[in-house]
Image (tube, helix red, strand yellow):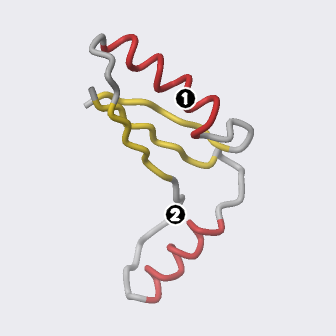
Amino acid sequence: MKAFVTVMPKAGVLDPQGKAIGHALAGLGFAGVGEVRAGKVIELELAETDPAKAKAAAEEMARKLLANTVIESFSVTLG
């Protein structure tokens, strides 16, 4: 089973990568782009076949390693 962990900076946390992307988009002529936030998606192939257990395992992995929960939030989806 695949799990996707999406990690994003929490609101209010500075995001220099997002700002750089926003400036680059403006420089390329893309008007109307507001705030840009950059995060990451981690794809996990899990042996677990029970969706609830797979999601719980991925959430535990995110809390312990994949996300810095002080400055980042995360969400887990199965696919």
Name the image quarter holding residue 3: top left
Q: How many marks?
A: 2
Position of 18 with respect to 52 (left or right) is right
Q: Nearer the viewer, residue 26 or 53?
A: 53
Answer few, some or many: residues within 10 Å of disc 1's Cα (few below 14, many 20 plus, some between 14 and 19): few
Q: Secondary structure at mark 1?
A: helix
Three-letter amino acid code at the position of disc 1:
Met
At x 30% / y 10%, what residue is drawn?
50
At x 31% / y 28%, what residue is drawn?
78
In the displayed structure, 27 sits above or below 47; it is: below
Residue 35: x, y in percent?
54, 63
Three-letter amino acid code at the position of disc 2:
Val
Instruction: Name, please, the residue furthest toward the front.
Output: 47
In the displayed structure, 13 sits above or below 47; it is: below
Residue 49: x, y in percent?
27, 14
Give how far apart the Cα atoms at labels 1 and 2 are. 26 Å
At x 65% / y 68%, what residue is drawn?
16
Instruction: Name, please, the residue furthest toward the right.
Output: 70
| Marks 1 and 2, the one that precedes in the sequence | 2
Quarter holding the C terminus? top left
Position of 51 with respect to 56 (left or right) is left
Residue mark closest to the camera, 1 vs 2 = 1
- Residue annotated with mark 2: 36
Residue 33: x, y in percent?
44, 69
Quarter holding the N terminus? top left
In the displayed structure, 55 sits above or below 76; it is: above
- Residue annotated with mark 1: 61
In the displayed structure, 60 sits above or below 37; it is: above
Q: Tell me the number on the disc at residue 13.
A: none
Residue 20: x, y in percent?
57, 76
Q: Secondary structure at mark 2?
A: loop
Q: Nearer the viewer, residue 18 or 43?
A: 43
